[in-house]
Image: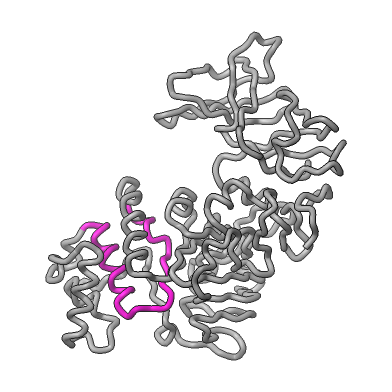
Amino acid sequence: MTDDPHPTQEATETERAGGDAPDGTDAATDGGAAVGTPGADASGGSDDAADGEPVVDGTDAGAATDGAAAAGEPVLQLRDVIKRFGSETAVSGLDLTVHEGELLTLLGPSGCGKTTTLRMIAGLETPTEGTIAVGGDVVAGDGAATPPEDRDVGLVFQEFALFPHLTVAENVAFGLDDPDSEAAAERVADLLDLVGLADYGDRSPADLSGGQRQRVALARSLAPEPDVLLLDEPFSNLDVSLRVRMREEVKRILDEAGVTAVSVTHDQEEALSISDRVAVVNDGTVEQVGDPGEVFEHPTSRFVASFLGQASFLPARVAEDGIETVVGAYDRDLLTGLGDGYVGSHVDVLVRPDDLRATPVAEGDADGEVIRRQYTGPSFVYHVKLHDGTVLRCLHNHTEEFDVGEPVAVTLVADHALAWYPAR
């Protein structure tokens, strides 16, 4: 690693064609362009984060960024995992470590390789190269290919996949060695109590709501006490209001059971709200992994910055006594890790809607004009096009209504350090 997380050399973009795996999983890339990572070398590794704390690079994406997730022992390890479907590369040199008792979420756009990664962990796909170890035992790679049923891994499917001809209790007991034993009955009773369905054992899955069926599927996967529980877009089949309630409920259940889990989603709010760590996946590799707050507030690449939240990039020139932008001059301390060596450099500053304010002014005093407004209920997000063509998003209370076409001045109001990237 180098000492400087922000080289001035501009990273190049590589475009790859998107495509799905033959089985319909999100195999290959999504057709988007890869973006440069501050401090990245040609292999995709990243240097120190903007706040000076160590971050995970592409060569060992399993290490925790803040030490919080490293309390448990490693339970799942992926090393240099590659998966190809014909000429398409779905997963490319992916490294990841999941620690005991944590919920790690693979987050990324459709086609980034996250579901293919989950299927390889489960044993439903075999890596083309690399190794996967569960509980210290290699289950894929090095000549090994342990069948799914012989891996200590549980899987909760999107569709829940309950057996309609079995009762709720029979579904939960299905994966146990002796489902008709007294010990199995006690295990099932404990799990149904854990998921809040203690009185539903004799019912049919057809009599349950979507949220209840999900909890049954979760209990069934937990019954054999797997080393790792895999959740494949677990909330995608639920309506929005139920989805929010169920993700909190599932997190509670996993915490109480002390289960190590890996979830896959493209829902940013879901990943950020319930995960112990988030691994952002792009083009089959982990771009960044860490505590949700760290990943959101200190993204180490343009892709991560753009994918998480509503990101805008404000062009700036680094001067000796500050940074100069089209919406005013600001203190250099506003940017993280900005040393004296960058004087005269052009950078792009990551700003989110709550970092900016728009103020209606006379046209001659304006920095730009409102070109769109998004009403979210509690607030408006105004899209402002500056005179140089840059588009910024500004967050305002729902009582502050501006018209599309209205001239506005824009002020940077962030009270925290901002990430930045070499200018393009």
Query: Which residue is depicted at the point 57% across and 48% down?
Result: 296
Horizontally, is 34 left or right of 158 in the view? right
Please name the residue shown 81% across and 33% down the image. Answer: 317
> From the viewer's perspective, is residue 346 above or below residue 109?
above
User: Where does the image place residue 307, in percent across and percent down from the top left?
Assistant: 58, 48
Residue ID at (57%, 62%): 67
Q: Nearer the viewer, residue 286 or 110?
A: 286
Bounds of the magenta span? 209-238
Q: Is residue 186 depicted above or below 307 in this figure?
A: below
Q: Is residue 99 magenta?
A: no
On-image quarter of the C terminus: top right
Q: Tell me, yes or no, whether the highlighted magenta stretch contains residue 233.
A: yes
Q: Tell me, yes or no, if residue 424 can be seen here.
A: no
Q: How many marks?
A: 0
In the rendered image, the vertical position of residue 61 relative to residue 227, given as above or below: above
Name which quarter of the figure residue 412 lies in.
top right
Q: Is residue 209 visible?
A: yes
Q: Which residue appears at 45% of the width and 86% of the height?
A: 147
- Residue 322 position within the rendered picture, expressed as x and y whole percent measured from the top left: 79, 31
Q: Quadrant of the N terminus?
A: bottom right
- Residue 327 is drawn in which quadrant? top right
Indicate the position of residue 124 as horizontal and vertical percent values: 47, 78
Is 88 positioned to the left or the right of 10 in the image? left
Between 94 and 225, which is closer to the camera in this rendering?
225
Instruction: Report the colour scheme.
Output: one colour
Residue 163, by quadrant, is bottom left
Residue 231 coordinates in the image, percent (x, y)? 41, 66
Left/right of residue 191 with respect to residue 270 in the rendered view = left
